[in-house]
């Protein structure tokens, strides 16, 4: 069963008297276990499409089904509940709470679900271990490099065991080494856990880490093809990397070869 199904979706906005069609009659299906990359020039509709798949916006027309649920008539509250239970989000700017440590940031989706503190702590620690940051559980974002912050964001997306991870330019604020690490983590999660991933990127090399590439132009899907020469990353052991550094050794993001 598809995790995502869009049929004839259009998203229009009005700027004064002018109507702008950000998406035009888009049909899209993403099967469970796929790793899909979406590319297109600025203004092509990439972010609009990701927002619709993530139930952060509503189609002007057409039908949307996410995780087997038809969303066309859902209330805002029901959409919020669907996002919390079935979707995980990773953003270019990490969107971590600066006053919370890594563990508390990862716990946030579980707080909204009302899980007891002990269960939240257990699941959040397991998610941090999944991305090699168990040793950084009590570091705040300002004490982490950019790559580490993005790994915390991935752990936060994973902690609720979502059906789908949506990543918006997940490597856009990182250097090439950190970008490869993030892509290696995504590929491992997709390969070993069968996690469905949809990422938007402007970087052709990053896009080729997925198994399928969708290109947009002027709000329309102009190509949808398998990635022929897929890039496969060998994941360095992030857990060993983190354990090798003493507590507090990481400087602010942007140091140590990683950029914010």
Image (spheres, grey):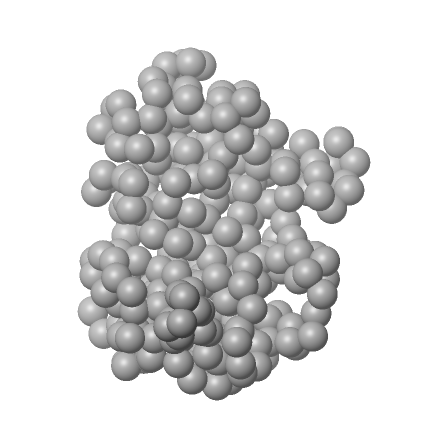
The quadrant where residue 216 appears: bottom left
User: Where is residue 152 drawn, in percent x and y?
Assistant: 48, 36
Closer to the camera in the image, 207 or 118: 207
User: Where is residue 136 drawn, in percent x and y?
Assistant: 48, 24
- Residue in the picture at 77% in, 42% down: 114
- Residue in the picture at 55% in, 48% down: 158
User: Where is residue 145 drawn, in percent x and y?
Assistant: 35, 27
Closer to the camera in the image, 241 or 121: 121
Left or right of residue 235: residue 153: right
Give the vertical position of 189 relative to 212 (above or below). above
Residue 194 shows up from this direction: no
Give the vertical position of 221 relative to 131 (above or below). below
- Residue in the picture at 31% in, 33% down: 260
Image mark count: 0
Closer to the camera in the image, 113 or 178: 113
- Residue in the picture at 23% in, 39% down: 175
């Amino acid at each position: 069963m598809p995790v995502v199904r869009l049929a004839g979706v259009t998203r229009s906005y009005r700027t004064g008297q002018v109507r702008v069609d950000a998406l035009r009659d888009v049909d899209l299906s993403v099967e469970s276990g796929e790793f899909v990359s979406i590319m297109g020039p600025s203004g092509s509709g990439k972010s609009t499409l990701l927002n619709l798949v993530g139930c952060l916006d509503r189609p002007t027309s057409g039908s949307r089904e996410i995780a087997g649920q038809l969303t066309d008539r859902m209330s805002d509250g029901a959409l919020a509940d669907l996002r919390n239970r079935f979707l995980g989000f990773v953003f270019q700017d990490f969107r971590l709470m600066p006053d919370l440590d890594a563990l508390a940031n990862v716990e946030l989706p579980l707080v909204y679900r009302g899980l007891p503190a002990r269960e939240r702590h257990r699941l959040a620690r397991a998610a941090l271990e999944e991305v090699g940051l168990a040793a950084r559980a009590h570091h705040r974002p300002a004490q982490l490099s950019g790559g580490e912050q993005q790994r915390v964001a991935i752990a936060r997306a994973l902690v609720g065991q979502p059906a789908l991870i949506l990543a918006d330019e997940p490597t856009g604020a990182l250097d090439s080494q950190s970008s490869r690490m993030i892509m290696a983590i995504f590929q491992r999660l997709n390969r070993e856990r069968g996690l469905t991933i949809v990422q938007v990127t402007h970087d052709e090399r990053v896009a080729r880490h997925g198994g399928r590439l969708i290109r947009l132009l002027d709000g329309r899907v102009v190509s949808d093809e398998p990635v022929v020469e897929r890039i496969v990353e060998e994941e360095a052991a992030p857990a060993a990397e983190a354990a090798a550094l003493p507590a507090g050794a990481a400087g602010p993001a942007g140091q140590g070869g990683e950029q914010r």
